[in-house]
Image (cartoon, helix red, strand yellow):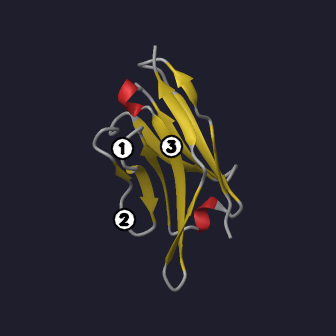
């Protein structure tokens, strides 16, 4: 079983920046895919950004040019750097890591709340 823990959420003003981090109980580079999803109040969970070993890095259209997903080899974390934040970015952000065994197995964190408001 892999444990996934997000950190770095909080309140930020529109136009501000925030960085989320995700730590796992296994080296972040050993997973087939890693990514961030978010769920706003009353909406479905959606993909924000994803790194996969078999496809190019993917971003949601709504965050392209503002968010950057990366892996930190020294800390073995998955990061999401968010800039030019908008009120519509307000959501609970979830870290997801996936491994392949007989099937794809996904692990999720409990989420980090990001609130963009003045």
Residue at the front extreme?
42
Point 44% across, 45% down: residue: 38
**Dot label at residue 55:** 2
Residue 24 x %, y %: 67, 57
Give the Cα distance between marks 3 and 2: 22 Å
Residue 3 x %, y % = 68, 60
Could you tell me which residue is drawn at 50 percent across and 43 percent down?
93
Numbered circle sitting on residue 43: 1
Kindly indicate whether the residue at mark 1 contacts the one at mark 3 (C-beta within 8 angstroms): no
Where, by quadrant of the figure, is residue 85 drawn? Answer: top left
Q: Is residue 40 visible?
A: yes
Q: Report the mark closest to the observer, 1 or 2.
A: 1
Residue 99 placement: quadrant = bottom right
User: Going from the N terminus, do you reach mark 3 or mark 2 first?
Assistant: 2
Query: Measured from the top left, where is residue 96 in percent x and y?
Result: 52, 57
In the picture, measured across the screen, residue 46 lies left or right of residue 97, that is left
Q: Residues within 10 Å of mark 2 (few under 14, many from 20)?
A: few
Residue, x 57% and y 46% (percent of image)? Answer: 111
103 above or below 82? below
Residues tagged 1 and 2 counted as in contact (Cβ below 8 A):
no
- SS label for mark 3: strand
- Looking at the rendered image, the quarter that the N terminus falls into is bottom right
Give the answer, above or below, for where 99 lies relative to 93.
Answer: below
* C-alpha distance separating marks 1 and 2: 27 Å
Q: Earlier in the sequence, mark 3 or mark 1?
A: 1
- Where does label 3 land, which residue? 93
The answer to whether any part of residue 86 appears in the image is no
């Amino acid at each position: 079983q892999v444990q996934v823990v997000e950190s770095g959420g909080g309140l930020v003003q529109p136009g501000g920046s925030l960085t989320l981090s995700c730590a796992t109980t296994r080296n972040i580079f050993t997973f087939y895919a890693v990514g961030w999803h978010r769920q706003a109040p009353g909406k479905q969970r959606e993909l924000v950004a994803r790194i996969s070993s078999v496809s190019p890095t993917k971003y949601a259209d709504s965050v392209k040019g503002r968010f950057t997903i990366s892996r930190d080899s020294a800390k073995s974390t998955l990061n999401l750097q968010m800039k030019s934040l908008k009120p519509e970015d307000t959501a609970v952000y979830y870290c997801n890591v996936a491994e392949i065994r007989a099937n794809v197995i996904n692990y999720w964190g409990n989420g980090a709340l990001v609130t963009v408001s003045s």
